Amino acid sequence: MFSLSEENYLKAIFHLEKRYSGGVSTNALAEEMETKASSVTDMVKKLSDKELVKYRKYQGVHLSDKGKQAAIEVIRKHRLWEVFLVEKLNFSWDEVHDIAEQLEHIKSEKLTDELDKFLGHPKRDPHGDPIPDSDGNFRISNKLLLADLNEGQSGICVGVKDSSTEFLRYLDKNGITLGKPIKVVQREEYDESLLIRINADDLRVSKSISTNLFIKPTE
Amino acid sequence: MFSLSEENYLKAIFHLEKRYSGGVSTNALAEEMETKASSVTDMVKKLSDKELVKYRKYQGVHLSDKGKQAAIEVIRKHRLWEVFLVEKLNFSWDEVHDIAEQLEHIKSEKLTDELDKFLGHPKRDPHGDPIPDSDGNFRISNKLLLADLNEGQSGICVGVKDSSTEFLRYLDKNGITLGKPIKVVQREEYDESLLIRINADDLRVSKSISTNLFIKPTE
DNA sequence: ATTGATTTTTAGGCTAATCTAAAAATTGTT
DNA sequence: AACAATTTTTAGATTAGCCTAAAAATCAAT
Ligand SMILES: [Mn+2]
Ligand SMILES: [Mn+2]
Ligand SMILES: [Mn+2]
Ligand SMILES: [Mn+2]
């Protein structure tokens, strides 16, 4: 089907297209893929020949329906494997990404579907990201960044934007896990930090924390 | 660490060295790898530079200790994943090989060891092949080919030599599974076929069956 | 030991995916 | 609108892994 590298490009374009809507620029893709712009141009041409992306020189790139479907399939596998590692093999949520990066390229539709069944058709991965079903449909949800909550507003932790080991370990250390209720006690506008109540304790978090934690507000 | 291709070569050399003791010839390796002799020579040189094999031009190749260890690690992963697919994901024993060929290259020592633990430290894969422990030690067993049993001798099915879909389906169709008792009722020397008793039924099997089924004789 | 067949290696090329350096196109600022 | 800065593409190399065809070494049989 598609090469490992092609799959990684498709996934990266998918994420970038979601993040900033509009065509994905060569440089943005190069940064995401940790490669050089010239390499991106080469690959984008190849993907374009295979009709996985729409590409006009100097105008950035968009996924075609076919490319989007392929990207979602890879994302589905990535997230299912992350659930497997955490739920079945005792990995913690900060250890699974690199292994899932490898496992997401295993080619077997039956494997993916049986894994999904074995895991009980999970809706979200260990970082709160939605897992598309076998038809490629995501369950969308009304989540906000912690940073966007008003003073006094409460919600439930439902996901992380940054999945780095460092951030996830910070959350673990401070008792912040998915599903936990959280309340914004006070907003300090000067440094954009927040005082939040979690586990009945008050904790001050800086902007780099609050812009990386997703909250589903309780109405 | 090692590339996918390098790992596959090491595994192939390991199997061939076991099968016929002595140096592994370029042609034998080319056939096993389904590639050309010239490609084998290239790769063998590379493995030799990395000290994974001992190689003298025209004299065939041997695994070094380092190469053997790497090969066993790949085999361990292959067989553990096969157990996972059959035991946890409802695959049948004739469907798992190609997927395990992909999964065996996933790099994470912790993943392998946790998988092993999750599966309850299985001793054999679905085809009866022994699974090395994390130190690379195989449990050896006194198994014979069905073809080597004498008339009247009994034993237990413990493994297959040929793991092809066709052979495994033949066994399924005739109720032959690992762990089943089996008895050689009569040997027909003319065509080297055997009459065997299995599940209280008599079944005639030709030489191509009896030379691909391993039996542990009951004394 | 010589010859002939077989096996193995070498020589030279190809493709996918990457890189550096240079050229071309686009964008932003006066 | 012109020019400088930035972005993107092109040109030309490199590496891993494979190929075909030719040369060299080994093996087998007289
Ligand atoms: Mn991940
Ligand atoms: Mn994730
Ligand atoms: Mn197998
Ligand atoms: Mn097996």
Image (cartoon, coloured by chain):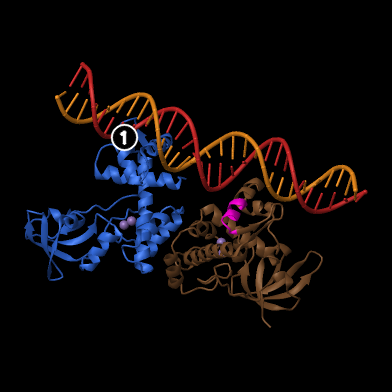
Chain colours: A brown, B blue, C red, D orange
Query: SS for tag 1?
Result: loop
Decide: few, some or many residues near mark 1? Use Cα within 10 Å; few <14, some 14-19, many ≥20. some
Examine the image and state in which quarter residue B145 appears. bottom left
Residue A74 horizontal side relative to residue A205, left or right? left
Assign ligand 4 to one image quadrant: bottom left
- Asked if one can make out residue B69 in the rendered structure from this viewpoint, the answer is no
Residue B188 part of the magenta segment? no
Residue A51 part of the magenta segment? yes
Please provide percent x and percent y for residue B138: 29, 51
Q: What amino acid type is highlighted by mark number 1?
A: Gly
Residue A77 horizontal side relative to residue B182, left or right? right
Q: Nearer the viewer, residue A112 or A177?
A: A112
Q: Looking at the picture, does residue A171 appear above or below residue C24?
A: below
Which residue is label 1 attached to?
A: B60
Examine the image and state in which quarter residue A174 appears. bottom right
Q: Nearer the viewer, residue B122 or A66?
A: A66
Q: Residue at x 31, y 34 (%)?
A: B60
Please provide percent x and percent y for residue A130: 57, 70
Residue A24 horizontal side relative to residue A82, left or right? right
Q: Nearer the viewer, residue D5 or A216?
A: D5
Residue A140 horizontal side relative to residue B95, left or right? right
Q: Residue at x 44, y 58 (%)?
A: B111
* Segment tinted magenta in the rendering: A44-52
Q: Residue at x 40, y 61 (%)?
A: B115
Q: Looking at the picture, does residue A120 appear above or below residue B127?
A: below
Q: Nearer the viewer, residue C5 or B191?
A: C5
Looking at the figure, which quarter contains the C terminus of chain A?
A: bottom right
Examine the image and state in which quarter residue C24 appears. top right
Q: Residue at x 34, y 42 (%)?
A: B30
